[in-house]
Image (cartoon, rainbow, N blue to C red):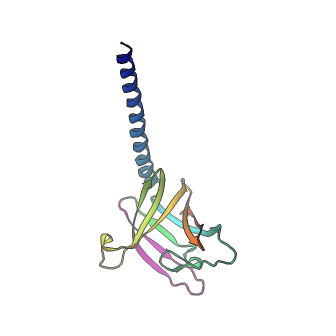
Amino acid sequence: MKKVFHAVLMAGLLAVVFSSCKSSKSAQAATAKSEKKSVKGTWVLNNISFEGVPKTARITTVFNNIPYKCLEGSVWTLPNATANGTYAITSGETGCSPVTQNIVWSTYDRDGIVYFQFKELLSGVKAKNTPDGYRVELTSVDNNSMTWRAPVNIDGQTAYINYSLSRR
Protein backbone atom coordinates (compact mmCIF):
# COMPACT_ATOMS: atom_id res chain seq x y z
CA MET A 1 0.00 0.00 0.00
CA LYS A 2 2.85 2.38 0.84
CA LYS A 3 4.44 1.69 -2.57
CA VAL A 4 1.19 2.55 -4.35
CA PHE A 5 0.83 5.74 -2.28
CA HIS A 6 4.43 6.77 -3.09
CA ALA A 7 3.93 6.00 -6.80
CA VAL A 8 0.77 8.14 -6.92
CA LEU A 9 2.52 10.93 -5.01
CA MET A 10 5.52 10.87 -7.40
CA ALA A 11 3.23 10.87 -10.44
CA GLY A 12 1.38 13.87 -9.02
CA LEU A 13 4.62 15.74 -8.38
CA LEU A 14 5.87 15.02 -11.89
CA ALA A 15 2.57 16.26 -13.34
CA VAL A 16 2.94 19.52 -11.41
CA VAL A 17 6.55 19.98 -12.57
CA PHE A 18 5.72 19.30 -16.23
CA SER A 19 2.65 21.52 -16.20
CA SER A 20 4.62 24.40 -14.66
CA CYS A 21 7.28 24.07 -17.39
CA LYS A 22 4.62 24.08 -20.08
CA SER A 23 2.89 27.18 -18.75
CA SER A 24 6.15 29.12 -18.44
CA LYS A 25 6.91 28.49 -22.13
CA SER A 26 3.42 29.69 -23.02
CA ALA A 27 3.95 32.80 -20.90
CA GLN A 28 7.23 33.50 -22.71
CA ALA A 29 5.57 33.19 -26.13
CA ALA A 30 2.78 35.48 -24.96
CA THR A 31 5.41 37.99 -23.84
CA ALA A 32 6.99 38.24 -27.31
CA LYS A 33 3.55 38.47 -28.91
CA SER A 34 2.33 41.14 -26.48
CA GLU A 35 5.57 43.10 -26.88
CA LYS A 36 5.08 43.14 -30.65
CA LYS A 37 1.70 44.80 -30.09
CA SER A 38 3.38 47.37 -27.83
CA VAL A 39 6.13 48.08 -30.37
CA LYS A 40 3.76 48.85 -33.24
CA GLY A 41 3.54 52.54 -34.11
CA THR A 42 5.81 55.41 -35.04
CA TRP A 43 8.93 56.06 -32.97
CA VAL A 44 11.72 58.63 -32.91
CA LEU A 45 15.19 57.39 -31.97
CA ASN A 46 16.19 60.19 -29.58
CA ASN A 47 19.53 59.05 -28.23
CA ILE A 48 22.23 56.43 -28.67
CA SER A 49 24.48 55.91 -25.64
CA PHE A 50 27.28 53.54 -24.76
CA GLU A 51 27.69 51.41 -21.63
CA GLY A 52 30.94 49.78 -20.59
CA VAL A 53 32.90 51.11 -23.57
CA PRO A 54 36.53 51.86 -22.62
CA LYS A 55 37.59 55.48 -23.07
CA THR A 56 40.22 54.34 -25.57
CA ALA A 57 37.60 52.68 -27.82
CA ARG A 58 35.67 54.63 -30.38
CA ILE A 59 32.33 53.52 -31.78
CA THR A 60 31.31 55.57 -34.78
CA THR A 61 28.81 53.38 -36.65
CA VAL A 62 25.87 51.10 -35.85
CA PHE A 63 23.73 48.67 -37.84
CA ASN A 64 24.70 48.87 -41.53
CA ASN A 65 27.73 51.12 -40.90
CA ILE A 66 25.47 54.11 -40.28
CA PRO A 67 27.20 56.86 -38.30
CA TYR A 68 25.31 56.74 -35.02
CA LYS A 69 24.91 60.53 -34.96
CA CYS A 70 22.99 60.23 -38.26
CA LEU A 71 20.63 57.65 -36.75
CA GLU A 72 19.73 59.92 -33.83
CA GLY A 73 16.46 61.64 -34.72
CA SER A 74 15.49 58.93 -37.19
CA VAL A 75 11.82 58.00 -37.44
CA TRP A 76 10.91 54.30 -37.21
CA THR A 77 7.51 53.40 -38.63
CA LEU A 78 6.35 49.97 -37.45
CA PRO A 79 2.79 49.69 -38.76
CA ASN A 80 -0.09 47.85 -37.16
CA ALA A 81 -1.13 45.69 -40.08
CA THR A 82 2.14 44.12 -41.27
CA ALA A 83 5.70 43.30 -40.28
CA ASN A 84 6.99 45.69 -42.95
CA GLY A 85 8.11 49.13 -41.90
CA THR A 86 10.69 51.83 -42.47
CA TYR A 87 13.25 53.96 -40.77
CA ALA A 88 13.95 57.43 -42.09
CA ILE A 89 17.20 59.28 -41.46
CA THR A 90 16.65 63.03 -41.54
CA SER A 91 19.74 64.30 -39.73
CA GLY A 92 21.51 67.37 -41.07
CA GLU A 93 24.79 66.37 -39.39
CA THR A 94 27.90 66.44 -41.57
CA GLY A 95 28.25 63.12 -43.39
CA CYS A 96 24.58 62.17 -43.01
CA SER A 97 22.43 61.51 -46.05
CA PRO A 98 18.65 61.63 -45.71
CA VAL A 99 17.22 58.24 -46.66
CA THR A 100 14.17 56.09 -45.99
CA GLN A 101 15.00 52.40 -45.63
CA ASN A 102 12.35 49.66 -45.94
CA ILE A 103 12.58 46.94 -43.29
CA VAL A 104 10.83 43.79 -42.17
CA TRP A 105 10.65 43.51 -38.37
CA SER A 106 9.41 41.29 -35.56
CA THR A 107 9.89 40.49 -31.91
CA TYR A 108 11.61 37.29 -30.84
CA ASP A 109 11.72 35.50 -27.49
CA ARG A 110 14.83 33.57 -26.48
CA ASP A 111 15.07 32.14 -22.98
CA GLY A 112 12.64 34.72 -21.61
CA ILE A 113 14.41 37.73 -23.18
CA VAL A 114 12.45 39.59 -25.84
CA TYR A 115 14.34 40.97 -28.83
CA PHE A 116 13.41 43.44 -31.55
CA GLN A 117 14.82 42.25 -34.86
CA PHE A 118 14.83 43.65 -38.37
CA LYS A 119 16.26 43.22 -41.83
CA GLU A 120 16.76 45.97 -44.36
CA LEU A 121 14.85 45.28 -47.57
CA LEU A 122 16.68 46.16 -50.74
CA SER A 123 14.69 46.89 -53.88
CA GLY A 124 13.57 43.65 -55.52
CA VAL A 125 15.08 41.39 -52.83
CA LYS A 126 12.85 39.37 -50.50
CA ALA A 127 13.57 39.28 -46.77
CA LYS A 128 14.23 35.52 -46.89
CA ASN A 129 17.02 36.21 -49.40
CA THR A 130 18.61 38.89 -47.21
CA PRO A 131 21.24 37.17 -45.05
CA ASP A 132 22.03 40.08 -42.73
CA GLY A 133 19.75 41.36 -40.03
CA TYR A 134 19.94 42.99 -36.64
CA ARG A 135 18.69 41.89 -33.24
CA VAL A 136 18.61 44.10 -30.15
CA GLU A 137 17.27 43.31 -26.69
CA LEU A 138 13.96 45.05 -26.06
CA THR A 139 14.68 46.15 -22.50
CA SER A 140 11.53 48.24 -22.06
CA VAL A 141 8.49 49.42 -23.96
CA ASP A 142 5.37 51.27 -22.86
CA ASN A 143 2.92 53.76 -24.36
CA ASN A 144 5.54 56.52 -24.61
CA SER A 145 9.04 55.05 -24.73
CA MET A 146 11.07 52.09 -25.86
CA THR A 147 14.66 51.08 -25.12
CA TRP A 148 16.89 48.69 -27.05
CA ARG A 149 20.22 47.30 -25.90
CA ALA A 150 22.81 45.64 -28.15
CA PRO A 151 25.98 43.90 -26.94
CA VAL A 152 29.26 44.63 -28.73
CA ASN A 153 32.64 43.02 -28.22
CA ILE A 154 35.47 45.49 -27.62
CA ASP A 155 38.89 44.05 -26.93
CA GLY A 156 37.37 40.82 -25.62
CA GLN A 157 34.99 42.65 -23.27
CA THR A 158 31.24 43.01 -23.66
CA ALA A 159 29.93 46.55 -23.84
CA TYR A 160 26.47 47.78 -24.84
CA ILE A 161 24.91 50.24 -27.23
CA ASN A 162 21.64 51.64 -25.81
CA TYR A 163 18.96 53.08 -28.07
CA SER A 164 16.25 55.32 -26.53
CA LEU A 165 13.08 55.92 -28.55
CA SER A 166 9.89 57.87 -27.90
CA ARG A 167 6.48 57.36 -29.46
CA ARG A 168 5.54 59.98 -31.99
Give x and y (percent) for residue 58: 63, 79
The reply to whether the magenta stretch includes residue 22 is no
Q: Quadrant of residue 6?
A: top left
Residue at 42% across, 67% down: 118
Residue closest to the eye, 111 or 88: 111
Residue that protrudes farthest toward the top in the picture: 1
The residue stretch that appears in magenta: 81-105
Give x and y (percent) for residue 145: 57, 58
- Quadrant the N terminus occupies: top left
Residue closest to the eye, 80 or 115: 115
Give x and y (percent) for residue 101: 43, 76
Residue that protrudes farthest toward the right in the picture: 55
Give x and y (percent) for residue 74: 53, 73
Residue at 30% across, 73% down: 129
Residue closest to the eye, 135 or 57: 57
Residue that protrudes farthest toward the bottom in the picture: 95
Residue at 45% across, 48% down: 31
Residue 77, compared with residue 65, is above or below; it is above
Q: Is residue 19 left or right of residue 164?
A: left
The reply to whether the magenta stretch includes residue 100 is yes
Q: What is the tally of numbered marks visible in this picture?
A: 0
Residue 3, compared with residue 54, is above or below; it is above
Q: Quadrant of residue 51?
A: bottom right
